[in-house]
Amino acid sequence: MIALLRGVNVGGNNAIAMPELKSAFEKSGFQRVRTYINSGNVIFESGCEDEGAIREACEAAIACAFGLPVPVAVLSAEALADALAHAPAWWGADAESKHNAIFVMPPATAESVAGEVGAIKPEYESVASHGRVIFWSAPLKTFSRTRWSKIVGTPAYSRVTIRNANTAKKLLELARG
């Protein structure tokens, strides 16, 4: 399983040290716990298959250990592999562009989040989705003109957590390994 914490270690807010996060997950009964970079990515095994129950357990572990109400997106390695297998060809391809995987947290859907953000500006950005993952790319030089660069601060922003393409691909590699 993969847990993606929303809003930790961003701009000095919700600071959580990854060794302490790993320990909190282990104390909650998760096995083979590993973290990846400082943005709140946890790869682990669980005896439970229910993603909702796992998400609740992760959020409870974080609240108990750190006193923070941190939303968590949980997905299996298989779900991430399926999403990445359906990523559009343009996603992650251009070195001069920003490429994000936007993970939608239930009960929100990719469609509802996209609807809240609004119509894309095709001259500046490309957007597609598969399951609960929205793929977004935009040239760095015109990034600020995109619709999706303005998601921060909107109601939709509270229902997603964002990772760049390299991080999303590395998480799948780690979860499979």
Image (cartoon, helix red, strand yellow):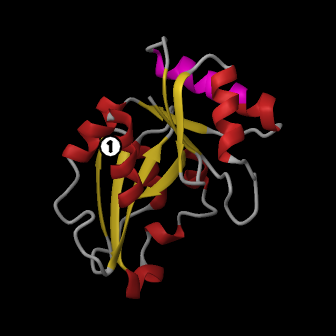
Quarter-of-image position of residue 99? bottom left
4 over 33 or under it: above or below: below
Q: Which quadrant is the C terminus positioned in? A: top left
Q: Position of residue 3 (x, y in %)?
A: 52, 36
Q: Which quadrant is the N terminus positioned in? A: top left
Quarter-of-image position of residue 109? top left
Q: Residue furthest left?
A: 89
Q: Position of residue 115 (x, y in %)?
A: 42, 53
Q: Position of residue 154 (x, y in %)?
A: 60, 59
Residue name at image x 32 percent, y 43 percent: 173
| Residue 58 included in the magenta stretch of the image | yes
Residue name at image x 44 percent, y 71 percent: 147
Q: Identify the element where label 1 is drawn.
A: helix
Question: What predominant SS class does the magenta segment belong to?
Answer: helix
Left or right side of 155 for 160: left
Residue name at image x 49 percent, y 28 percent: 44
Q: Identify which residue, 111 or 129, lies in the foreground.
A: 129
- The amino acid type, in three-letter code, at marker 1 is Glu
Q: Position of residue 65 (x, y in %)?
A: 79, 32
- The range drawn in magenta is 50-61
Left or right side of 82 for 53: right
Left or right side of 61 for 155: left
Instruction: Return the residue at label 1.
Output: 173
> Dot 1, how many residues are within 10 Å of its Cα: few (below 14), some (14-19), or many (20+)?
few
